[in-house]
Image (cartoon, helix red, strand yellow):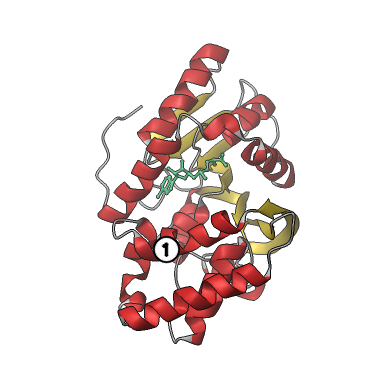
Amino acid sequence: MTNKLELNEYKQGVANLYNQRSESYDNSDWHVQICHRLLEYSQVSYGQTILDIGTGTGHLAFAAAQVVEDRGKVFGIDISAGMLKQAQNKANALKVNNIEFQLLDAESLDYPINHFDRILCANTFPWMENKKDTLSLWCSFLKSGGRIGIHTPADTAYIGAVLLRKVLARHGVSLEASNRIGSIEQCVNLFTSAGFEGIEIKTEKHGSYTSLEKAKAAWSGTIVHPSSISLKIYSNELSKLSPVKLAQVKAEFDTELEALETKEGIWDEIVTWYILGHKP
Ligand SMILES: C[S@@+](CC[C@H](N)C(=O)[O-])C[C@H]1O[C@@H](n2cnc3c(N)ncnc32)[C@H](O)[C@@H]1O
């Protein structure tokens, strides 16, 4: 595994975030379930060569490695050395030898063209800075007929973030051009323009009650911490608001969230998408 990677400030921020989360990342089953479903939908089979983008601690890579067996090979790439270390430790402990973990940026990969049978990406695509060019690049690495499978939260996921965007929009501030993927139509257009065919989006609804406090944290995560990644993404838009206006937006945001509170908490609906397609 290469252990040095030049990243821009934004990506270094993302890598740092996941380096910090790497040791506790496997405490939740949520990502494992998603990865298994994505694998199933993408029709991974024996002997295939698979690229797992944003592999993290390797949930999808390990599941794929079991299916492709020794005749196949899985490449798991990520910009977070911490996440990859967890993945590599598991591979060593389990003596899995058909996965190669690589410290690489998904937006500047250099694989041979027409190389992979499947390119999979779970819970990572929203982090891509230039989605169209990145998808075109990934498409070039797929064999003809090879499939892409991407799992991502829909724009309607996470109540705090949804309400924050809604309230800001009322004040002329748009966070829509951030790391969101857009409507189903925009998503199909994006994948088609990157060279994929037969785009299908499978939707799944998850959700749980969250506390008012946690839902309100969308504000501090986006607006308050000057070093946060979101602020870097949104800073141009947010600079349109004076401190007084910002305080007004905050009050409206809190009021709207408080109105949703029940005795169980606030219902946080998480709609997720499995975006599937193939290279012609
Ligand atoms: C939410 S985790 C998902 C991990 C794994 N796919 C899963 O579902 O459990 C997102 C991962 O994407 C990685 N990531 C973000 N931007 C990336 C980029 N440009 N290139 C490669 N990996 C990236 C992060 O470091 C992190 O490990």
Report helix, strand or loop for mark 1.
helix
Is residue 112 shown left or right of residue 207?
Answer: left
In the rendered picture of this protein, how many numbered marks are placed on residues? Answer: 1
Is residue 222 shown left or right of residue 264?
Answer: left
Q: Estimate the x, y position of residue 89 in percent, counting from the top left.
A: 47, 19
Residue 132 sits above or below residue 18 on the image? below
Q: Is mark 1 within 8 Å of ligand 1?
A: no
Q: Farthest residue in the front direction?
A: 263
Q: The residue under label 1 is which amino acid type? A: Thr
Q: Estimate the x, y position of residue 245 in percent, counting from the top left.
A: 38, 83
Q: Which of the 4 image quadrants contains residue 47?
A: top right
**Residue occupying image coordinates x 69% and y 56%:** 265
Q: Nearer the viewer, residue 127 or 201?
A: 127
Q: Nearer the viewer, residue 9 or 96?
A: 9
Q: Quadrant of the C terminus?
A: bottom right
Q: Estimate the x, y position of residue 120 in percent, counting from the top left.
A: 58, 45
Residue 176 sits above or below residue 1 on the image? below
Q: Estimate the x, y position of residue 241 in percent, counting from the top left.
A: 34, 82
Q: Which of the 4 image quadrants contains residue 17?
A: top left
Q: Which residue is mark 1?
A: 222
Q: Is residue 39 visible?
A: yes
Q: Is residue 109 visible?
A: no
**Residue occupying image coordinates x 46% and y 29%:** 23
Q: Nearer the viewer, residue 67 or 152?
A: 152
Q: Quadrant of the N terminus?
A: top left
Residue 107 sits above or below residue 56 on the image? below
Q: Nearer the viewer, residue 145 or 155?
A: 155
Dot 1 crowding, Cα within 10 Å, few <14, some 14–19, many 20+? many
**Residue occupying image coordinates x 33% and y 58%:** 225
